[in-house]
Image (cartoon, rainbow, N blue to C red):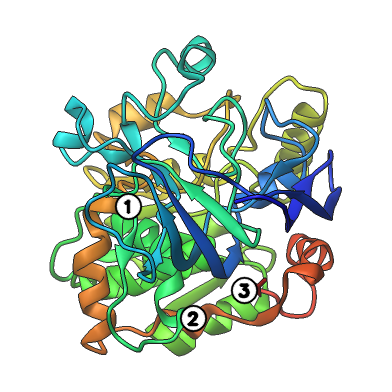
């Protein structure tokens, strides 16, 4: 595909630009090219926007929540044809390695061409991701007019109904991420589930916890619009952490036993209060720690003995003063990880088609790709009630 296209590109901390970049081309015979019809800004994109993710390069194309129409396929692509309407998962997976065969798609052994760089930091490399640093593959993202999709027979899910883009787009990331978070929490009948963070992933974790049988859901945040969304769409009880001590309030609400299951849907940029919150920010700014583990500490302290802690929130590196003693002595189970998106595509698409859930409820802003830089700022500053922004090229 000769010529250029419009894309959102990264140029440093809080510097996203609309630029003309080369259109993608078929590189490997298992590739496909997708013309993007809808793409979204994810909370994880803000980690890049705020300069916390290492190995970004100036001009990198952002975005990992895209969908669109297949316009070209490599000669070894069998499952997709030109004209197919598809949602593209943010995880890039080969489908043939040991991890993919075990349905652990976000741990693919073959999709990160920069695996050695990731292994230096993590021990082993996870899968490559769209638009999320060179440590995780250096792949161009989907906040653009076109996207090259490697391993095209493994990733995209075909949308063969007339459901609008807004209802299926979030199969790319946040709906499966929220669902896997709830699944990892090992929810049982009559459980009380506490969810930290009522952004898009938190909202889908709340919805999924309800689907999986949670009796009570307690949503924790400080943004009124997010707390209201949790109340309105999932009948969640809520805690504003700027108005109440989270530990004290959760103990009161659970008869001093603690929530059975705790979900950290916040991750590295958690906001704390008082001296502890200020100290975390100072340490992060001084590069004494990579993450602000406010929520992780709270969840470990609050979760009932023998409970489960699920962590879909993205952490990037080292965290200081994580209470491993309470974690061990309270016999907590911890489950985390990037989402194995391909595992969930078909069953979650079926839930949408059956009317069990309409994921578009999280959308608060829709705009053109050219409006992307402004929406990054709005989303980052939690202004104008922005919970989820969808862009159309």
CB of mark 3 within 8 Å of CB of mark 2? yes
Q: Is residue 10 above or below residue 265?
A: above
Q: Position of residue 346 (x, y in %)?
A: 21, 65
As drawn, is 217 to the left or to the right of 197?
A: left
Q: Which is more toward the observer, 7 or 178?
A: 7
Q: Secondary structure at mark 3?
A: strand
Q: In the image, which disc is placed on residue 341?
A: 1
Spatial CA distance of label 3 from label 1 is 20 Å
User: Which residue appears at 31% of the width and 24% of the height?
Assistant: 109
Which comes sooner in the sequence, label 1 or label 2?
Answer: 2
Q: Quadrant of residue 357?
A: bottom left
Task: Find the distance from the CA under tag 3 to the CA under tag 2.
Answer: 8 Å
Q: Secondary structure at mark 2?
A: helix
For marks 3 and 2 on the same chain, the one whose residue lies earlier in the sequence:
2
Q: Is residue 248 above or below residue 123?
A: below
Mark 2 = which residue? 166
């Amino acid at each position: 595909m000769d010529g250029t296209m419009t894309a959102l590109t990264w140029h440093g901390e809080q510097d996203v630009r609309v630029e003309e970049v080369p259109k993608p081309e078929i590189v490997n015979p298992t590739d496909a090219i997708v013309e993007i019809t809808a793409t979204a800004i994810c909370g994880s994109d803000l980690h890049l926007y705020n300069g916390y993710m290492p190995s970004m390069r100036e001009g990198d194309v952002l975005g990992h929540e895209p969908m669109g129409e297949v316009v070209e396929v490599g000669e070894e692509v069998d499952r997709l044809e030109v004209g197919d309407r598809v949602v593209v998962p943010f995880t890039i997976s080969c489908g043939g390695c040991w991890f993919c065969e075990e349905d652990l798609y976000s741990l693919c052994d073959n999709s990160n061409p920069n695996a050695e760089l990731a292994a230096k930091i993590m021990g082993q490399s996870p899968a490559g991701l769209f638009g999320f640093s060179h440590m995780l593959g250096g792949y161009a993202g989907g906040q653009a007019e076109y996207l090259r999709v490697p391993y095209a027979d493994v990733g995209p899910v075909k949308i063969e109904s007339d459901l609008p883009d807004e209802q299926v787009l979030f199969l790319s990331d946040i709906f499966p991420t929220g669902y896997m978070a709830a699944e990892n929490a090992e929810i049982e009948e009559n459980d009380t589930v506490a969810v930290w963070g009522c952004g898009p992933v938190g909202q889908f974790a709340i919805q999924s916890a309800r689907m999986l049988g949670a009796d009570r859901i307690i949503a924790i945040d400080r943004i009124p619009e997010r707390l209201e969304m949790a109340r309105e769409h999932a009948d969640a009880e809520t805690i504003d952490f700027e108005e109440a001590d989270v530990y004290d309030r959760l103990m009161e609400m659970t008869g001093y036993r603690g929530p059975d299951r705790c979900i950290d849907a916040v991750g590295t940029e958690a906001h704390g209060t008082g001296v502890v919150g200020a100290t975390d920010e100072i340490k992060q700014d001084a590069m004494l720690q990579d993450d602000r583990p406010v929520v992780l500490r709270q969840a470990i302290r609050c979760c009932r003995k023998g409970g489960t802690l699920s962590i879909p929130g993205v952490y990037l590196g080292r965290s200081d003063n994580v209470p491993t003693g309470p974690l061990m002595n309270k016999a907590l189970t911890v489950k985390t990880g990037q989402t194995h998106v391909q595992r969930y595509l078909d069953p979650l698409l079926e839930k949408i088609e059956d009317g069990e859930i309409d994921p578009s409820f999280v959308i608060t802003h829709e705009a053109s790709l050219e409006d992307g830089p402004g929406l990054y700022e709005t989303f980052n500053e939690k202004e104008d009630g922005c919970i989820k922004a969808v862009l159309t090229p």
